[in-house]
């Protein structure tokens, strides 16, 4: 996800290029960390509400980023990508869910999976509402440039996360949602794709298929949300 290039043109005109890069990296990393944290907390909270206490017992029903950080996916890879000016990618620790503890295992597991992308969509909507409020108030001068860019970046990253995670390939959330919608016999066969899921996703990313799926809806929703 090329998270920085779209927002750097508006701010920090009095700072050096080195300062701009460092600040942009910090801002992008912070927005990604918050977005991933809320995403995983939404999974955990939904599972807890539907009867599975596994995530709560592990401290995952929390908005503390430390409860969800994966050292490689949440810290190392995003920082390497940012410093190298590569697409900003990352993930957090998956939330463990024991479907046997859910009242309606297939339906409830689907709801738990859907909670993550829904949380990202809601974050994008909230950020867009705040952006509109700030801009309608006329706060577009230099002191407001950074907050505006943070809100813009929050919209962009959360929409990209939402639509990427909705790709119907296990172990992504979209794959788990699809498993809940398919007839049981078909779902059982489709779930066998899980062991090859990451290979499928890498192939989709390298061939550009993932971007072809994710970018158009992201741009379409951004046109609706942005002032």
Image (cartoon, rainbow, N blue to C red):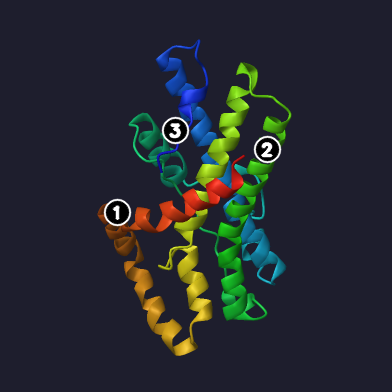
- Between 66 and 14, the one lying in front of the other is 14
**What is the x, y in percent for residue 6?**
45, 34
**What is the x, y in percent for residue 173?**
50, 64
How far separated are the C-alphas under marks 3 and 2?
Answer: 21 Å
Q: Which residue is mark 1?
A: 208
Residue 64 lies in quadrant: top right
Q: Earlier in the sequence, mark 3 or mark 1?
A: 3
Residue appearing at x 60%, y 36% in the figure: 151
- Between 143 and 171, the one lying in front of the other is 143
Residue appearing at x 57%, y 65% in the figure: 114
Per the rendering, the mark at residue 132 is 2
Q: Earlier in the sequence, mark 3 or mark 2?
A: 3
What SS does tag 2 mark? helix
How far separated are the C-alphas under marks 3 and 1?
Answer: 20 Å
Residue appearing at x 41%, y 43% in the figure: 1
Residue 34 lies in quadrant: top right
Instruction: Relative to 13, say whether 165 is above or below.
Output: below
Instruction: Relative to 94, say whether 102 is above or below.
Output: below
Instruction: Count neighbours of disc 1 (C-alpha within 10 A) and say few if under 14, some if 14 to 19, many if 20 or more.
Output: few
What SS does tag 3 mark? loop
Please state if 201 lies on the left or on the right of 224 as rendered: left
Q: Which residue is mark 3?
A: 4
């Amino acid at each position: 996800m090329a998270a920085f290039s779209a927002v750097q043109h508006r701010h920090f005109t009095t700072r050096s290029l080195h300062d701009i890069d460092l600040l942009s990296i910090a801002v992008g990393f912070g927005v990604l960390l918050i977005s991933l944290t809320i995403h995983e907390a939404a999974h955990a909270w939904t599972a807890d509400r539907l009867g599975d206490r596994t995530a709560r017992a592990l401290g995952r029903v929390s908005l503390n980023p430390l409860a969800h950080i994966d050292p490689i996916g949440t810290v190392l890879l995003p920082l390497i990508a940012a410093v190298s000016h590569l697409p900003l990618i990352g993930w957090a620790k998956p939330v463990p869910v024991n479907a046997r503890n859910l009242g309606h295992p297939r339906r409830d597991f689907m709801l738990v999976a859907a909670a993550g992308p829904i949380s990202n969509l809601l974050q994008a909507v909230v950020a867009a509402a705040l952006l509109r409020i700030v801009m309608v108030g006329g706060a577009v001068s230099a002191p407001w440039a950074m907050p505006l860019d943070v809100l813009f970046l929050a919209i962009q990253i959360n929409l990209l996360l939402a639509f990427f995670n909705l790709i119907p390939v296990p172990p992504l959330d979209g794959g788990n949602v699809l498993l809940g919608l398919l007839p049981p016999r078909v779902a059982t066969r489709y779930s066998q794709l899980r062991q090859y899921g990451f290979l499928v996703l890498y192939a989709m990313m390298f061939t550009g298929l993932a971007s072809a799926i994710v970018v158009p809806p992201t741009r379409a929703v951004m046109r609706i949300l942005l002032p």
